[in-house]
Structures are given as C-alpha cells and as structure tokens.
Image: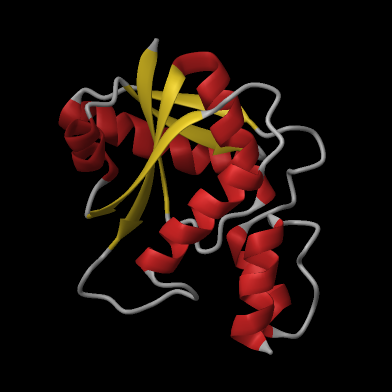
Amino acid sequence: MARVLYPGSFDPLHVGHVDIIEQASRLFGEVVIAILHNPEKHGGVFTVEQRTQLIHGALADAAFARPVKYEVHAYPGLAVDAAKAAGADFIVKGLRNSGDFEIEQQMAHTNFAVAGVPTVYLPCSPGLASVSSRFVREIAQYGGDPSSMVPANVAMALKEMFS
C-alpha cells in the first residue's frame, strides 16, 4: 500500500474533505492530512492547532465502512515539501468540477516538475460538489447553519466561534 499526502488549509474541515480522506485511505492505505499554513501570516477562522483537533475529532466520530489509517500534521510552505517530509508516494487532491481540475492540474504539473511527486485526483461523491470551506465560513459568519456541510464537532466549533 502507498502513503499519500492530502494537503489543504482545512479551515474548516467539511464533509467533502472527509469523503476524500475515506476514498484515499481505501485506495492507498495511509493518508497524511497536511494542514498547510504560512507561519508568518495570521489568518483563517481556526488556528492550526484547532484545525488539527477538529480533524482528529471528526474522523474519530465518522462512520467509515472500513478503518481509516491517517495522520494529521501541520506544514509551513509547499505541498511538495510536506510530501517529502511525510514520505508520501503521491499527493491526493479532490475534484468537485472542471474548475477545480484546471487549478489542480497546473499545481500537479508544477509539483511534479519541482519534486517529482505525482498527483492523483479523486472525484467527490455525488451531492458534495457544492461544498467548500469558503462557503462554510461565509454561512457561519453570517449566522447561517452549515451543519449539513461539516462534521458535528466542526458545526459546534463554528457556532461557538460566531455566536
């Protein structure tokens, strides 16, 4: 089995992320969830430490068909550097639509040219194509209920953050 890196900001983690983590685990074996961040920039809804805790909590509570083998690590900088540090064989990216493909394809070519790490795309499960961290953040910031788009622990954390 392979070890794969799933990079992102995960600010916040949503059900689409959980879907890709489960798919990647089933296909490859071990998933390293890489919270990418710039330590010189303050930003985002949740701190890196909070994101790490939310990911662990959400995956512990998830009803997966099979056990999911994963690790969560925070990395400053580039996904290819995180992939090397994690000993990943591939980078995994989720795709919702053709727009995602256009962006991810450019990054995949660049990552391969820079570090020789190939990228594998996984389509999101039907019904999850409209879920994004940006939309979740906006809904929560304006007092809406994003609970259908995020794990229960993330919904509670967002409610506390914006109440």
Q: Is residue 58 above or below residue 124?
A: below
Q: Which of 39 and 62 is in front in this view?
A: 62
Rendered image quadrant of residue 90: top left
Residue 92 place in picture, x, y as percent? 44, 30
Closer to the camera, 98 or 9? Answer: 9
Question: Which residue is pictured at 38% across the width and 77% down the height?
Answer: 43
Quarter of the figure with the N terminus:
top left
In the image, taking residue 30 as reference, residue 60 lies left or right, namely right
Q: Which residue is drawn at 18% across and 36% down?
A: 85
Which sits in the foreground, 38 or 47? Answer: 47
Task: Establish if 11 lies above or below 33.
Answer: below
Q: In which quarter of the image is residue 86?
A: top left
Rendered location of residue 129, percent (x, y): 73, 44
Q: Residue furthest bottom?
A: 163
Q: Which residue is drawn at 28% across and 26% down?
A: 88
Residue 42 in percent (x, y) is at 32, 79
Whether residue 135 can be seen here: no
Quarter of the image with the C terminus is: bottom right
The quadrant holding residue 60 is top right
Say which residue appears at 53% left-offset and 15% top-offset.
27
Task: Report whether 44 appears left or right of 151.
Answer: left
Q: In this image, 37 relative to 122: left or right? A: left
| 163 lies above or below 102 | below
Outermost residue to the top: 1
